[in-house]
Amino acid sequence: KMRAAAPVFAQLPMFAASATLLGCQQDSYEIAMRLYWRRCGYRNHVRMNGAVATLDSHAGSTRAFMDDEKLPSIPQPESAERDRLNKLIEEVECGSVEQRLGLTPLEAWESRWSPAVLDVLAADACDAFCAARALRVLVLSARQWPDCSSMMKRFLAESEFMPRFERVCERSLAQADHATLSAILHGFGTLRFRPAKRVLELWFSQAENVTFNTQHLSNVLWALAKIGFRPPETFLTDWFNGFSKQHLSMNAQGTSTCIYALAKLKIGPDDQFLPRWHDCFKRNMKRFNPQGLSTALWSLAELNVNVNDVPGFMESWHPSFERMHVNFQVEGLVQVLWAFAKLEIEPARYRQEFLDMWFDRFISEWRTFSMNELTKSLWAVAKMSDLEEVFVPNVFFKLWYRQFIIKAEFLHADTLSTTMFAMGKLQLQPWKACLDAWFAQFDKCAGHFQGRQLASCMWALGRMRIKPPKQFLDRWYEQFSCVEPKLTSQSLSNTLWGLAAVGLTPSNSFLEVWYTAALRELRHASAQELSNMMWAFGKLILQPREEFLDAWFKVTEKCMKHMHQQRLVNMIHAFQRLRILPTPKFVRIWTSQYEKQVQFMTANTRQLCRQGLDSIMLLVTGDSESSSESLSEARNNTVPQIRELWDKESRHTRTMRLLDISDRGVRVR
């Protein structure tokens, strides 16, 4: 009768945390017997070191038994080490250590559990299964008291546990089955501890000889993500093949775990994975909880997967979020908002509908947002506003400012710069108290700012047209000079643009540092960065140095074909204000680009170009005192092209404007 009942018992509900460590090596008859006695409430009292321990067994801890009927089982002989570990695990699982043993969890670990684990690993009869069970003791012990992760990592790093564990793996890991391999890696992943290189080599070597079921496929990849170890390509190939064959039996938790692990490991999925993963997602859609929904979308965003290329994904995800968004916790809310901003999800209606629901939830939970979560949320809203015009209720900013003022003391360099950058993108006018809190925290953290972060702050202040206080500028200039070797062309461009936007003429000491970095990085600058630099000089009426101008023209002439109309206008307007004579090659390329884009320009933009062109022609004509070989070359090459351009411009606007270049002249400085 018991043998007939075994398949029924084998399909009882399971829980992944302890699944692979409770009897997965036994045949189905033994499993059925153990489960039968558990269901009858069998309790066994044993004495360990003079203390009576009640061994409570739970059928919920037998999740790994599901697939024992499908995969060949490997009978394991009983041993003293296994008996001791079984009793030890059950003692740790029971909890209430103080009542049963008169010891705190920490005292029980130091006096009973850790010595017992080390003794078992030192025994000659200890095999891979025992080693996995020993690791399980550490996992369960870590849950007995708070703030124990660091202590467990120290124990693994400093005690004899890992050397003994490695010797056991050398001796017996080659005989381990899929469940034992999964249990070992899952234990290290739970403890966030990466084992020695040799242990991982042995593990991957044996993994090639076993077949993981769906539960173990997700568990091992999750564990690798937690220890931060990218597996070899051979393992990944086998893993993707295993997923392709068994994905139809994967549950909701496994579905979200797989894509999460790939995202954490930064492993791009192959072409066949995403369609099959999406099949799992749709099939388990009603079983996903808020955490699974947020994890799935966050992982796709982290992998830069265009969800618009996954047909039907948003049609499945969006209704589920609509149904469950009231149950989302803060972490999940921040994850999905960040993912929406990064993925640029289409159609656009999803974005506004999602934001409306998200803001409703934020209004309920704003007090529980940490400073880091506030920063990410504001950045995501700013990013989404770049895609299209979205409605952001004023109450969001009011509550955000209130929470920011309360928690500003927890800001560090990265969150300070990201917050200011996001406010600049949104072109906000923050509360004075909010700005005061930001500047005060900057003063404390200025020494930790990198060049990119300093540039982002100055750019954002310029974008909002907020003139910073003198104390901020002094600290900012000081730190800027310290990070000069690490400045990029983008940082240099944003810095100068921000100063010009608020009308701050930089000091001579700042310009010395800026020019040094600019001459080094200018060759890497983009078309926008080059245009912004020249615009800033023109805005400040600050004459650039000759060596900088020479380098700027050489780089700009190569990338001007990528400039749109506003950048063309910015440069020509700066030349007009600074009375700079461009090179003949620059004028030829500029006029060619202008001619291509003039029909798309507004009347105001064309007027600015006319004024700039007029100024250039006056400079090109010069007078007798300024004639030279280079000026003559400029005149011969540019004047006919400019005259022809103006003729086309006049016909385009149906406005005739007669130009008498020969009668005009200015001194070229």
Image (cartoon, rainbow, N blue to C red):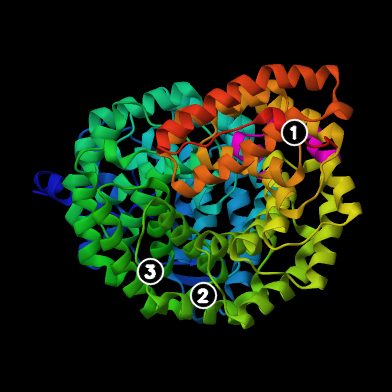
Query: Is 401 left or right of 236, judged from the image as shown?
Result: right
Question: Residue type at mark 3?
Answer: Val
* Total number of numbered discs in the rendering: 3
Gap between marks 3 and 2 measured at Cα: 52 Å
Q: Do the residues labelled 3 and 2 touch (CB within 8 Å)?
A: no
Closer to us: 114 or 617: 617
Q: Earlier in the sequence, mark 1 or mark 2?
A: 2
Report the front residue among 13 and 653: 653
User: x%, y% of residue 539?
Assistant: 70, 53
* Residue 392, label in figure: 3
Q: Which of 16 and 406 is in front in this view?
A: 406
Rendered image quadrant of residue 59: bottom left
Dot 1 or dot 3: first in sequence order is 3
Q: Residue at x 49, y 73 (%)?
A: 369
Q: Is residue 588 left or right of residue 654?
A: right
Query: What is the number of the mark on residue 619?
Result: 1
- Residue beneath label 2, please? 97
Q: What residue type is labelled 2?
A: Val
Q: Main secondary structure of the magenta part?
A: helix
**Toward which corner of the image does residue 444 lie, by quadrant?**
bottom right
Vertical side of 406 occupied by 543: above or below:
above
Left or right of 453? Residue 479 is right
The CA distance from mark 1 to mark 2 is: 90 Å
Q: Residue at x 38, y 24 (%)?
A: 238
Q: Is residue 614 above or below residue 438?
A: above
- Looking at the image, is mark 3 or mark 2 earlier in the sequence? 2
Residue 654, x across and y down, in percent:
40, 37
- Specify the quadrant of the image occupied by residue 389: bottom left
